[in-house]
Amino acid sequence: MTRSKLTFIRFENGVWQAHIGIDEEPAIEVQYLGEPLNSASLSPAENGWDLSIEVPRSALSEGVHSFVISDAATTETLGDFTIIAGTPAADDLRAEVALLRAELDMLKRAFRRMYRDDD
């Protein structure tokens, strides 16, 4: 398979969709938890192929779940996607925003101090 480009379309109703820009039908392998996932399907589309991956119900649970999409013939990684759900995800996001706010406040104080010192 020649070099192809994977472009995300949408993730809706448990189905992750993307477009693969390549002429001939690709041999796609999707890995989840180190095992091949058999719920991927391809359909012809304008300028390539549309890829649909039914996400297993077990991946729609608390935690971080990663999927790797590769060319089965060359094992070249074409792309990946991650699903993050549950309470830890919300806590991580709040902690990250709090850290960003603290860093922004520190930068504002340093900028103001530098501006005062130049006068």
Image (cartoon, rainbow, N blue to C red):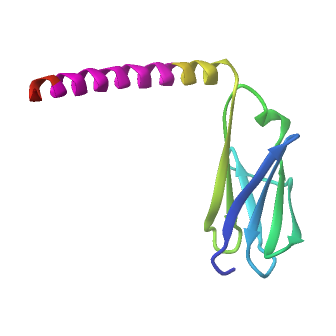
The x and y percentages for residue 10 are 78, 49
Q: Is residue 44 above or below residue 103?
A: below
**Main SS of residues in magenta:** helix
For image coordinates 24% across by 27% down, the residue present is 111
Residue 33 found in image quarter? top right
Q: Is residue 15 above or below residue 57?
A: below
Give left or right: position of 54 versus 85. right
Q: Quadrant of the C terminus?
A: top left
For image coordinates 76% across by 28% down, the residue present is 61
100 drawn magenta: yes
Q: Is residue 99 above or below residue 7?
A: above
80 drawn magenta: no
> Looking at this view, is 119 or 19 the one in front?
119
The magenta segment: 95-115
For image coordinates 55% across by 23% down, the residue present is 92
The x and y percentages for residue 2 are 66, 81
Q: Quadrant of the N terminus?
A: bottom right
For image coordinates 86% across by 71% down, the residue present is 45
> Looking at this view, is 48 or 102 the one in front?
102
Give left or right: position of 99 versus 83. left
The x and y percentages for residue 38 are 84, 55
